[in-house]
Amino acid sequence: MLHAIIIKFPKSTIDEQANVFFLQLVDCLANDHDYKVRSMVGAVIKLLIGRISQQSLDPILEYILSWYMGEKQNLWSAAAQVLGLLVDALKKGFQGHINNILPVTKNILKSAFDVVRDKQLDYSDEGTILLWKEAYYSLVMLENMLLQFPELHLERDLEEIWEAICEFLLHPHMWLRNISSRLVALYFAAASEASRANKEKSKQQNLLLMKPSTLFGIAVSLCCQLEARLIDDSANNILTQNLVFTICGMHSLVGQRDCMDLQSFWSSLQQTEQDHFHLLGSRKGRDMFVSLTSTTKHQGDQDSIENLQSLLVSPLLKRMGKIALQMEDIQMKIVFNAFRMISSQIGQEGSQHYAFHLLLPLYKVCEAFAGKVITDDVKQLAEEVRENIQRQLGNESFVRVYNEIRRTLKAKSDKRKQEEKLVVVINPMRNAKRKLRLAAKHSARKKRKIMSMKLGRWRR
């Protein structure tokens, strides 16, 4: 097989040797299962591409395309990796092949997503998920295409692929979630640039990922990502940026006068989009949405806009706040930084609309109501963000909302204490078990606090 390809190459001895070595490396890339080996091989291939003449790259491209478009699944991921590298090397010379590549990419993504539709399967071991590599390297290749040919971002021919990318935001494999987030960020940047160039924001709603319903679905998926394992600083920054963009985008687009009313909006959603309320755990919000859609037909435009903003944006902010308090420091930092940027972008009026949900988790951290040990750097960040939101709101509005939060938490505390007193009388056994759970919880919290203090001394 290698011999048949080499015949097509120029007779230059150096080029022949480089081509033979190149194809041997690609063969290794396709058949070696060790991640470190594949990474090193990929790095060597990238270096070698820069050393091979343009004339020699053309037959290599045709050969790799035959792999990617062929029926041998074990060759797809290696072919996608090399094609991604060839995009940068061939530049405009690669463009003529894009229309043939994208349908194959779409089919690979669809097959990879079909694999994980079965929620009953165990995905605890990411490496065992079928077709994740083929989908991942196809998306990396697509990322390189978009960077080289920015005009592709908003092409209607790519809409099915963008829909698949949005689905991959919830894929069980972290690499696929991260690359999908990167691609969504690229789309948002391209949409913003197109909006600035056209100076017509209303046209944004015609773009697939810029519709309020799609933005809401993406934001819900990002909230689910927040609850997963987060170890990559770059990916975390992109997650923060995407959360800010989707939430501010919904606030802005829904706030436009030509935005549809609640009833029209809800009826325009597909079942999968309506199901995003389930992912948020917002049964109350979903039920409220349904009831409002039947009663707001004759309400004024402003009432409809405010209801729609509240029912799209508020549940997301509320969910983000809960995740921040339930998870680790990294989630707190992502959420608090996102809240700071959201407040700055939506301004005073918007901040007042969502002030309670923006300030609630910050209040709990700053006033020691979080129910867990908070590190000094997280508390400092919370205080900085709180002050930033205070400047956006103005002192009077800030104090009013802050006091409302205090009263709400006190009322919940009083209600809980009253219920505990009733349990003592009605169900002594249950009360005894509750006391044991609380004792264990307090003991664990005390141990964490002591360990945190010791670590602080060691660092000094």
Image: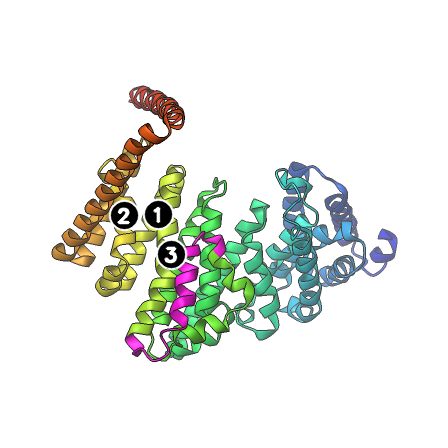
Q: Is residue 95 above or below residue 351?
A: below
Q: Label 3, on which residue?
A: 315
The residue segment tinted magenta is 278-302
The residue type indicated by label 3 comes to Pro
Q: Label 1, on which residue?
A: 321
**Magenta includes 137?**
no
First-in-chain label (1 vs 3): 3
The residue type indicated by label 1 comes to Gly
Q: Is residue 66 above or below residue 43?
A: below
At 39% from the left and 50% from the top, the residue drawn is 319
How crowded pointer 2 is (Cα within 10 Å; few <14, some 14-19, many 20+) is rated as many
What x and y, as percent, mark residue 336?
Answer: 32, 47
The secondary structure type at the circle numbered 2 is helix
What x and y, as percent, mark residue 427?
Answer: 37, 29
**Magenta includes 281?**
yes
Disc marking residue 360: 2
What x and y, as percent, mark residue 78?
Answer: 71, 50
The front one of 394 and 199 is 394
How crowded pointer 1 is (Cα within 10 Å; few <14, some 14-19, many 20+) is rated as many
Residue 21 makes an appearance in the image:
yes
